């Protein structure tokens, strides 16, 4: 299944504990249908203290299911669904359903 969200897209969380937060997609995991969004779903992991990390704690952004995020419309800044169209050369282009504007 092709995913409509790509690395570098700006998305908004539409459900869950982090609802309303915006961020840029850092990584897409297509097999698990998940995305890692900067500043969303931040977790703390405890590890053995070391010279580089004396407290032994580090934070990271955990993956979130792709159904819980929506792409931000480039013109209005509102969440939008994504469609496709083909240009004159036959290339597939993502289109924002809200405004009809090209995303790529």
Image (spheres, helix red, strand yellow):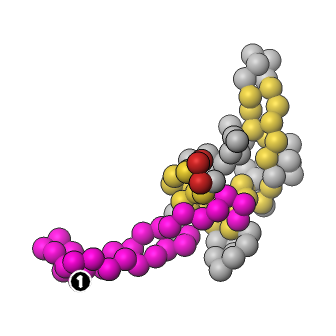
- For residue 32, side relative to residue 79 (left or right): left
Q: Is residue 10 visible?
A: no
Magenta stretch, residue numbers: 40-68
- Residue at image point 75% right, 16% down: 89
Q: Residue furthest left?
A: 51
Magenta highlight on residue 41:
yes
Indicate whether 104 appears above or below 66. above
Q: Position of residue 93 (x, y in %)?
A: 74, 32
Q: Residue furthest top?
A: 89
* Frontmost residue, 27 versus 47: 47
- Residue at image point 63% right, 66% down: 22
Image quadrant containing the N terminus: top right
- Residue at image point 37% right, 77% down: 45
* Frontmost residue, 75 versus 62: 62
Give the labeled residue for mark 1. Answer: 55
Magenta highlight on residue 29:
no
- Residue at image point 72% right, 55% down: 71
Indicate whether 67 appears above or below 27. below
* Frontmost residue, 1 versus 92: 1
């Amino acid at each position: 299944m092709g995913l409509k969200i790509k690395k570098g897209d700006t998305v908004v969380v539409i459900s869950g504990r982090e609802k309303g937060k915006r961020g840029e997609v850092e990584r897409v995991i297509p097999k698990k249908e998940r995305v890692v969004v900067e500043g969303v779903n931040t977790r703390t992991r405890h590890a053995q203290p070391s010279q580089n990390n004396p407290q032994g704690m580090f934070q990271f952004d955990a993956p979130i299911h792709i159904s819980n995020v929506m792409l931000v419309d480039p013109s209005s800044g509102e969440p939008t669904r994504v469609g496709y169209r083909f240009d004159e050369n036959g290339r597939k282009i993502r289109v924002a359903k809200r405004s009809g504007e090209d995303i790529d």
